Image (cartoon, helix red, strand yellow):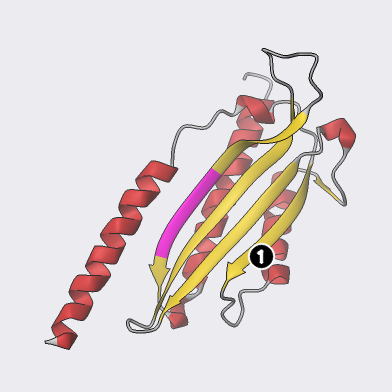
Amino acid sequence: MRNNMKPLLILSLLTAVLSAQAGIERSDTKESLRGLNGVYVVVQLVDQQPAGVTTNHVDSLVEAALKDAGIPSDNEPKRSNGDANLSVTVDIIQQPQLNVYIFTTEVAVTQDVKLTRSPRLEGMAAETWRRSLQGITSPDRLDVIDEALKRCVAAFVADYHAANSAGY
């Protein structure tokens, strides 16, 4: 009986993840990326780190994608760029009974903003753009996490270029 429950549980988890993903993939504005001349990349791994999923690996993947797209990566946040940070978070939880990893990859832009209703207030940091993907993978297919992260970074690259192209 227990082995019969495993496929049902995996299907239930996958359905829940896909439902959550639909809610996360909301329509964020590209306009907040207009005029952005670079970002400072911050990588954070939360919970578990399976072999091969390291901060250096994730950072290298993101930096390479930005370089290929012609988007400058700053060594530190720059005031002239609104102290823009590209925050990359990979959250991985192992589910030992099913021998799977449940993960979330997120790419977000945080930068200084001003409230239009209170222009005298100092600028403050706020998240202005975000993409997240959730999924489930087995220990022998950790490349699925990389692919989800690449999709989030590709969404940033596409919106960055759309906001900064001459015709936008």
- Residue at the spot 66% in from the left edge and 73% down from the top edge: 54
The quadrant where residue 121 appears: top right
Find numbered disc 1 in the image and state the secondary structure of the residue it sits on. helix
Q: Is residue 42 left or right of residue 91?
A: right
Amino acid, disc 1 = Val
- In the image, the segment drawn in magenta is 131-135
**Main secondary structure of the magenta stretch:** strand
- In the image, is residue 4 part of the stretch drawn in magenta? no
Return the residue nearer the eye: 69 or 20.
20
Q: Is residue 168 left or right of residue 86?
A: left
Above-or-below relation of 155 to 12? above
Above-or-below relation of 147 to 28? below
The quadrant where residue 102 appears: bottom left
Furthest residue to the left?
A: 1
State the residue position of label 1. Answer: 58
- Residue at the spot 61% in from the left edge and 58% down from the top edge: 89
Residue 19 screen position, x and y as percent: 31, 50
Q: Is residue 86 left or right of residue 72?
A: left
Return the residue nearer the eye: 35 or 6.
6
Return the residue nearer the eye: 70 or 141.
141
Residue 133 screen position, x and y as percent: 46, 53
Above-or-below relation of 93 to 131? below
Above-or-below relation of 132 to 31? below
- Residue at the spot 22% in from the left edge and 79% down from the top edge: 6
Residue 147 screen position, x and y as percent: 51, 62
Neighbour tally class for label 1: few under 14, some 14-19, many 20 plus, Cα within 10 Å: many
Report the quarter where the C terminus lies. Answer: top right
Report the quarter where the N terminus lies. Answer: bottom left
Residue 66 screen position, x and y as percent: 71, 50
- In the image, is residue 134 part of the stretch drawn in magenta? yes
